[in-house]
Every structure is written in structure tokens, then in C-alpha cells.
Amino acid sequence: DGKVNIINNAIPLDKYTFSEQIRYSIRKEYGIENKFVIGNIGRFFAEKNHLFLIDIFAEVIKKNQNAVLMLVGDGELRAKIEEKIDKLGLQKYVILTGVKSNVNELLAKT
């Protein structure tokens, strides 16, 4: 009766449907086929708090050496993020992908 407006989701949800094939290809591309993957997608800016995330991940690694952290994005704090990864000795556990256009496929890796 005109009292309700339906607003459709602006994100094409079908692009985010899980695909075993995409999951396999992404994991193979990054060499993380049998890893426990923690992912983060966002600009490398203070508001996103990547430096704290790396501290948390350092604690995860103490309990699970099979874990990897995949950071998707870029920004003004990239150098500081790389420095912290080096300082904590996490180079072999953290993947910095840069800006990616296939975020939907990266999300299929979980």
C-alpha cells in the first residue's frame, strides 16, 4: 500500500557465491593450499588498524604455525606495516597482495 520501499542490495551477491574451483586456484596461486588463512581487505590507513592486527596475528602464529595473514590493499601505512612484519619476524606468514580487483575470488579462499 505504498508504505514500504524496497531497496535492492547494490552488491551483486552471485559474484560472492562459494566456488571450490576458485578457492583451489586462489590458494594454489598464493601457495596456501593447506594453510589456516586469516584475511583482511582494506586501505592501509590508521583507521583500519593494521598494526594492531599484525600484533594479534603474531600471537596466532605462536599457537598455529600453519596460519597465514593475507592483507589485501595498499595505502600510506604500507611501509610501517612492512616494517612491523619484519620486526616481528612474520615475513613468511604474511602476504601483502596490494590492491586487487578480484576481491570476490579472494573471499572464496576461506
Image (cartoon, rainbow, N blue to C red):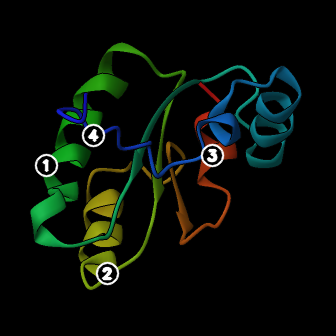
Camera-near label (3 vs 2) is 3
Q: Secondary structure at mark 3?
A: helix
Amino acid type at mark 4? Asn
Q: Are marks 3 and 1 in contact (CB under 8 Å)?
A: no
The image quadrant where one finds the C terminus is top right
Instruction: Tell whether 102 sits left or right of 74.
Output: right
Q: Which residue is mark 4?
A: 5
Specify which label sits upstream in the sequence, 3 or 4. Answer: 4
Q: Which residue is mark 3?
A: 104
Specify which label sits upstream in the sequence, 3 or 2. Answer: 2
Specify which label sits upstream in the sequence, 1 or 2. Answer: 1
Q: Which residue is mark 2?
A: 79
13 up-or-down from 44: above or below: above
Residue sitting at 35 percent across and 44 percent down?
7
Amino acid type at mark 1? Phe
Camera-near label (3 vs 1) is 3
Instruction: Tell whether 23 sits left or right of 76.
Output: right
Q: Return the x and y of residue 22 as percentages of the image width and height.
A: 82, 35
Q: Which residue is mark 1?
A: 52
Crowd class of label 4 (few under 14; some 14 to 19; many from 20; radius 10 Å) = few
Instruction: Tell whether 14 sits left or right of 19.
Output: left
Camera-near label (4 vs 1) is 4
